[in-house]
Image (cartoon, rainbow, N blue to C red):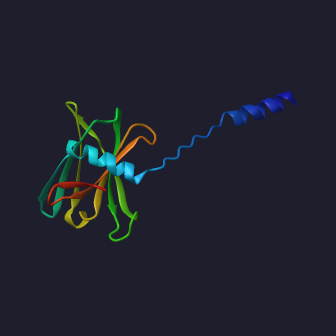
């Protein structure tokens, strides 16, 4: 009986669950995005109905390292509805951090960038992209 109880305890002890819930504060994200707007450079090169995009980002925000960057396309005229979301590979060269991607001109409206800093929930900055004017606007 003791060995059976011990076996059951060992069996259930070997499983663990990890949960993490993040709450986003839109006002805090917008404030942080405005604060770091001048630290980000953005260039778009148009050729044959394609756009090559390079974004240079701060390697750290509030002491937290850049952990992920996503390009997001939202559905026009519908708040918080995402058409696609793709992770971008972070490139590090000589202490500078950038991401690069290419898209067709037909996919270039209603795009924004999300950059996350730190582990877990960390810090988030978001910018709407205007490819023709090469301008960023905090979302």
In this rendering, the answer to whether 30 lies above or below 66 is below
Residue at the image point whose x is 34% and y is 32% from the top: 63
Quadrant containing the C terminus is bottom left
> Observer-nearest residue: 35 or 65?
35
> Observer-nearest residue: 128 or 93?
128
Quadrant containing the N terminus is top right
- Residue lying farthest right? 1
> Observer-nearest residue: 14 or 60?
60
The quarter of the displayed image where residue 65 is located: top left
> Observer-nearest residue: 112 or 38?
38
Q: Position of residue 10 (x, y in %)?
A: 72, 31
Residue at the image point whose x is 30% and y is 48% from the top: 33
| Total number of numbered discs in the rendering | 0
The quarter of the displayed image where residue 16 is located: top right
Q: Position of residue 106 (x, y in %)?
A: 23, 67
Q: Position of residue 60 (x, y in %)?
A: 30, 35
Residue at the image point whose x is 27% and y is 44% from the top: 35
Q: Position of residue 83 (x, y in %)?
A: 36, 64
Residue at the image point whose x is 35% and y is 67% from the top: 75
- Residue lying farthest bottom? 77
Residue 65 seen in this snapshot: yes
Residue 88 seen in this snapshot: no
């Amino acid at each position: 009986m003791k060995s059976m109880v011990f076996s059951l305890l060992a069996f259930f002890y070997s499983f663990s669950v990890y949960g993490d819930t993040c709450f986003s504060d839109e006002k805090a994200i917008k404030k942080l995005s405005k604060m770091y707007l001048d630290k980000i450079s953005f260039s778009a090169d148009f050729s044959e109905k394609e756009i090559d995009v390079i974004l240079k980002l701060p390697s750290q925000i509030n002491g937290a390292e850049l952990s992920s960057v996503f390009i997001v396309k939202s559905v026009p005229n519908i708040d918080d509805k995402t058409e696609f979301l793709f992770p971008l590979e972070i490139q590090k060269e000589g202490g500078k951090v950038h991401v690069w991607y290419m898209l067709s001109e037909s996919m270039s409206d209603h795009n924004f960038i999300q950059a996350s800093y730190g582990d877990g929930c960390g810090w988030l900055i978001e910018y709407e992209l205007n490819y023709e004017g090469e301008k960023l606007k905090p979302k």
